[in-house]
């Protein structure tokens, strides 16, 4: 259970890369940067040109998540709904396990257990997908796709394995 993302580390923000709706013609902008020891996932969501999502992803390294019960997040958002997304090699390209969480403008500690994740492909639920195998997680990330245009900001103080 060694997964612990620390945005105080000099190179942590550089491990995250953006995948926004430009991959399908949209014009949303989003990315992650470090700010005073926090990870800040921020940008602007646009529904123009078939768009509507922004995301950031990172390889978990050697998370050893097989013994964890899930993932604990310490976040402060802007009142919008975000997703924590996990990817494994068991899923086809473009599919992910997601857990949605609403933000309130206040700091929240969220314990997302493996049962909180559902399998989706381009926003649609996949009922016949294999169950999440935590020891096989190859990528984790945040996504916003709440169908509301405008600026967004999610501050992440910590992301770690849930014992």
Image: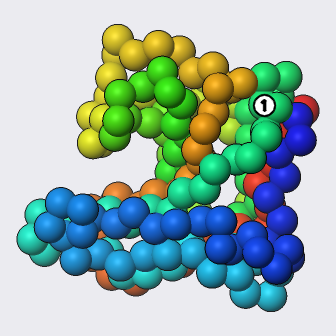
Residue sitting at x 14%, y 67%: 25
Where does the image place residue 85, in percent across and percent down from the top left?
Answer: 52, 45
75 sits to left or right of 37: left
Residue sitting at x 63%, y 33%: 137
Residue sitting at x 50%, y 27%: 89
The residue under label 1 is: 65
Where does the image place residue 123, in percent across and percent down from the top left?
Answer: 29, 42
Residue 4's place in the image compared with 75, above or below, is above
Return the residue nearer the eye: 58 or 46: 58
Where does the image place residue 151, in percent across and percent down from the top left?
Answer: 40, 83
87 sits to left or right of 73: left
Where does the image place residue 114, in percent across and percent down from the top left?
Answer: 66, 27
Is residue 148 visible from the viewing direction of this image? yes
Residue 77's place in the image compared with 163, above or below, is below
Splitting the image into 4 quarters, where does residue 129 fall?
top left
Splitting the image into 4 quarters, where does residue 14 fall?
bottom right
Splitting the image into 4 quarters, where does residue 35 fall?
bottom right
Few, some or many residues within 10 Å of mark 1 (<14, 14–19, 20+)? many
137 sits to left or right of 61: left
Return the residue nearer the eye: 91 or 152: 91
Residue 89's place in the image compared with 37, above or below, is above
Quadrant where the N terminus sits is top right
Residue sitting at x 83%, y 65%: 6
Return the residue nearer the eye: 62 or 8: 62
Return the residue nearer the eye: 133 or 84: 133
Is residue 152 visible from the viewing direction of this image? no
Quadrant where the C terminus sits is top right
User: What kind of element bears circle 1?
Assistant: helix
56 sits to left or right of 67: left
Residue 39's place in the image compared with 135, above or below, is below
């Amino acid at each position: 259970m060694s997964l612990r993302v620390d945005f105080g580390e000099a190179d942590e923000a550089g491990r995250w890369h953006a995948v926004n709706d430009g991959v399908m013609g949209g014009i949303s902008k989003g990315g992650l940067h470090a700010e005073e020891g926090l990870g800040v996932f921020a940008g602007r969501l646009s529904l123009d040109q078939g768009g509507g999502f922004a995301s950031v992803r990172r390889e978990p390294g050697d998370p050893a998540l097989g013994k964890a019960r899930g993932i604990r997040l310490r976040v402060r958002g802007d009142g919008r709904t975000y997703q924590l997304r996990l990817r494994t090699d068991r899923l086809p390209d473009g599919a992910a396990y997601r857990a949605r969480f609403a933000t309130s403008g206040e700091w929240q500690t969220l314990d997302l257990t493996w049962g909180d994740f559902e399998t989706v492909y381009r926003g649609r639920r996949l009922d016949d997908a294999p169950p999440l195998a935590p020891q096989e997680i190859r990528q984790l990330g945040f996504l916003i796709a709440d169908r509301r245009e405008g600026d967004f900001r999610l501050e992440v103080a910590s992301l770690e394995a849930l014992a």
